[in-house]
Amino acid sequence: MIYKVWYRNLIVWTKYIKPSLVANLGEPLLYLLLMGYGMGKLVPEINGIKYIDFLAPGLILSSAMYAASFEATISSYTRMITQKTYDAIMVTPVNLSEIVSGEILWSTTKGLISSVFFVAIMATFGLVHSWIFIVSIVAVIMDGLFFSALSMVFVGFSHSYEFFNYFFTLILTPFFLFSGIFFPIDTLPEWIRHIALYMPLTPMVDLARMSNNGILDYNALVLSIIMGLLSIPMGIISYKLIKKRLIK
């Protein structure tokens, strides 16, 4: 039944696929063009890597993070509260745990779709350098699972769309800025560096960047998988919070 929830969201998404892809790909593409090719002309190589080659793999993960997070917050909240879709689905044999699991799975899929399109753009610009880069799909999936489940926790807490500003500004933005996407985290002050090392996006960015340069970072791979597995307890928490709101 989880698949049914996933499939229902897929069918709805196909109705507005073009604006959805523009929203998911527009910002990272601008970062790639303006910072990678613009500021990249002014930045020397980082650890022997051209700046655009340093930047591009990290943008894949940020694209997945934002696509999954927006789907699992704004869209899920709309289905739950505004459209009352959850109430309608629960009249069928599908239960709430399956709805929550289906939402997390679908949001992860949105992140994966966004990343695949971004990789296609990278390939067009000649920025894919190694077949080992295929391993980055693990990071993308773990990224989607982690942030989808975390977002659903906030859906369980939220009582308005404005509440998600806390999530986007205080959680996603620091992850985006301090996970080594734009610069090596070892350039940060020591106390910030220690925090950045434990951010969930950091090992995923490292895995994508290293694999694109033909190196499989096993430590980053393991940490990425651990981050993805954290979606299980977060999914359970989100289910309990949403159940408390909907089933009285």
Image: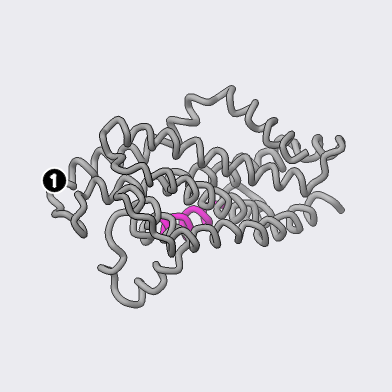
Determine whether, in the image, residue 148 is placed left or right of residue 20.
right
- Residue at 46% x, 58% y is 221
Task: List x then y, in percent, for residue 196.
Answer: 39, 67
Task: List x then y, in percent, for residue 75.
Answer: 61, 39
Q: Amino acid at mark 1?
A: Lys
Quadrant where the N terminus sits is top right
Reply above or below: 120 against 179. above
Q: Which residues are magenta?
A: 164-176
- Element under disc 1: helix
For residue 233, which quarter of the picture?
A: bottom right
Q: Nearer the viewer, residue 161 or 104?
A: 104
Label 1 Cα neighbours within 10 Å, binned few <14 / some 14-19 / many ≥20: few
Determine whether, in the image, residue 100 is placed left or right of residue 187.
right
Helix, strand or loop for the magenta stretch, by majority: helix
Q: Residue furthest bottom?
A: 191
Task: List x then y, in percent, for residue 150.
Answer: 59, 56
Q: Nearer the viewer, residue 124 or 17?
A: 124
Q: Residue furthest top?
A: 15
Reply above or below: 14 against 103. above
Where does label 1 land, which residue?
41
- Residue at 64% x, 46% y is 104
- Give yes or no for residue 111 being in the magenta stretch: no
For residue 103, which quarter of the picture?
A: top right
Q: Nearer the viewer, residue 187 or 228?
A: 228
- Give yes or no for residue 170 being in the magenta stretch: yes
Determine whether, in the image, residue 140 is placed left or right of residue 38.
right
